[in-house]
Image (cartoon, grey):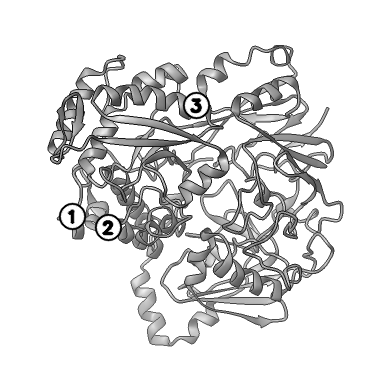
Amino acid sequence: MAWDYFQFKRVNFAAISAILLAVGPGVNQAQAEPQHGIAMYGQPALPPDFVALPHANRDAPKGGALTLANTGSYDSLNPYIQKGNVPWQLRFLTHESLMGRNRGEPFALYGLLAESIEVPDDRSWVEFTLRPEARFSDGSPVTVEDVLWSYETLGTEGHGRYRSLWGQIESLEQVGPATIRFTFNTDNRELALLAGMRPILQKAQWEGKSFADAALADVPIGSGAYVVSDYEAARDVVLTRNPDYWGKDLPFMRGTFNFDEITIDFYGDGDVEFEAFKAGDVSAIREFNAEKWANGYDFPRATSGEIVQSEIAHKKPSGITGFVMNTRRAPFDDWRVREALITAFNFEYINDTLTGGAQPRITSYFSNSPLSMQPGPAKGAVADLLAPFKDTLLPGVLEGYTLPQSDGSLRNRAGLRRALGLFEDAGWTTKDGKLRNANGEAMTFTILLNQQRTEDRAIADLYTQALSGLGIDVKSEMVDGAQFTARTGAFDFDMTYHRRAMSLSPGNEQYFYWGSEAADTEGTPNLMGAADPAIDAMIDAMLTARTADESLAATRALDRLLISGRYVVPFWQFTTGRVAHVKEVHFPDVIPLYGDGADWMPQFWWYEE
């Protein structure tokens, strides 16, 4: 799909606002009318009478079974609470929201549980009208009461990802037989869309039960196409397609959720998972190592054609993947130390050793997309947004920042010399073979790793060798998946592996990722502890933008702050998804803008001999 998201016509919103004020508040109500969908800017691309999503095979056959694999274990089947380790696929298969995304548009929503959406021009409120046919998997109707209860419960007792929206809702009320109105307390145009994206739970199921402390057996009832039909703790989860699924004839759902059964098996680590795939016990896996993709699929089932290697390109931002430094702790609270540790990471050598040099490095949090910061000094609207903070910005924000490069050799002498210079600037010098501060204390820290992720261990081993040569005592601490989740959620680490995907429509979630409030809130993805008023201001600007150009400038300014903050030692990016799968499972010819993702495979795939 050609990128035309940021080409919408400019609108004089100041003039419109003046007219609205002159006419009076009632004009907002008069201008609003029910629509089949909504876009962040402009109008949604699909017309009211669309028959299927463009990237779905509307004629895909139903049937067959699919077996997927996860590493680690699980102790909960409720993905909507903070407690527990949950199979990550569940929330994409069992529950639905009022609106649903089109993966071919950066941020456009269409009616799912709701048949229509209604907003005024200023988006100070939004109304959703439920479809009368919407049903939970037990056959009971999805009601306004369920929606009201779901939003309040998720906002007050649910996972941290749901808290921000709840805090920006002034009121939530029923205004018609099947209509709910959200009124917001902040100027944030994205809220009208976000309000349509929360999972809807069944209120009756939780009467007399604690939602936040749900037991493993308390599997949430949803309205989605699949139900959890069986499970064995820490071993597998079986999901069965509901034959009475209410939305099977909805145009938005046509050609989706085609497998009769999906099983998620759990394995000790990635190596064991791959052996299970080779043996035929797993139907499909995602491969993140380009070198292994090129040379590791020469086993009999692959060479015979029973296994197909499919590459799925995308235009998503790179996000950030790497070793994140906890700035709540010394010495990572000093940007010069963080820059030195990034410089000491011999990316070119490590990338060549582990991936054959096939994967490009992440250059910013939004690289591989038009949202990425532009090279060189900040200009135009980006510079204007950053100007109020010029006295507190780190080097590189305004001037332009590029990651240090090595010569690709094992020794990386020039890189290590530069790293030592940065350490000296920060007050660390070499004495008795150790890097020490002014008090004589040696620099030492631990890299926390999930023992199921074998590739992270290999990267850490190569990195640790270089750091040891600088006189830094570094050790890797391997823990199981549950401990890793608990430790990172509590910010109990020095340095650890971190992956944060980014979308083409960044918004409120950015507060959750690196907003100042999230830095002190356990369970948020702000692992680095970023607490920068400039970052908060750029997110504010992004969310109050009235045009796509304004949003673009704010995002590029935010990108500069994040990469120049030196919070993460970046690894390589994944510009192409790689899925190896049995030849009986297929995907549509039309690949959406977002490519592969949690809600693309298996949602749009099907089984066919």
Identified at 33% across, 52% down, the residue is: 530
C-alpha separation, residue under disc 2 versus residue under disc 3 = 35 Å
Position of the C terminus, as image quadrant, is: top right
Q: Relative to 304, does residue 268 appear above or below in the rendering?
A: below
Q: SS class of the residue under badge 2?
A: helix
Q: Position of residue 77 (x, y in %)?
A: 69, 52
Q: Relative to 521, does residue 342 appear above or below in the rendering?
A: above
The 10 Å Cα crowd at callout 2, few under 14, some 14 to 19, many 20 or more, is many
Q: Is residue 59 left or right of residue 475?
A: right
Identified at 52% across, 70% down, the residue is: 166
Quadrant of the rendered image containing residue 44: bottom right
Quadrant of the rendered image containing residue 138: bottom right
Among numbered discs 1 and 2, the one appearing first in the sequence: 1
Q: Amino acid at mark 2?
A: Ala
Q: Amino acid at mark 3?
A: Glu
The answer to whether residue 175 of the structure is visible from this angle is: yes
Q: Amino acid at mark 1?
A: Thr
The numbered dot on residue 392 is: 1
Q: Position of residue 28 (x, y in %)?
A: 49, 80
The 10 Å Cα crowd at callout 1, few under 14, some 14 to 19, many 20 or more, is few
The answer to whether residue 403 of the structure is visible from this angle is: no
Q: Which residue is under mark 2? A: 534
Q: Relative to 245, does residue 497 appear above or below in the rendering?
A: above
Which circle, 2 or 3, is nearer the viewer?
Answer: 3
Q: Which residue is under mark 3? A: 455
Q: Is residue 401 left or right of residue 194?
A: left
Identified at 65% across, 52% down, the residue is: 91
User: Mark 2 and 3 residues: CB-CB less than 8 Å, in contact?
Assistant: no
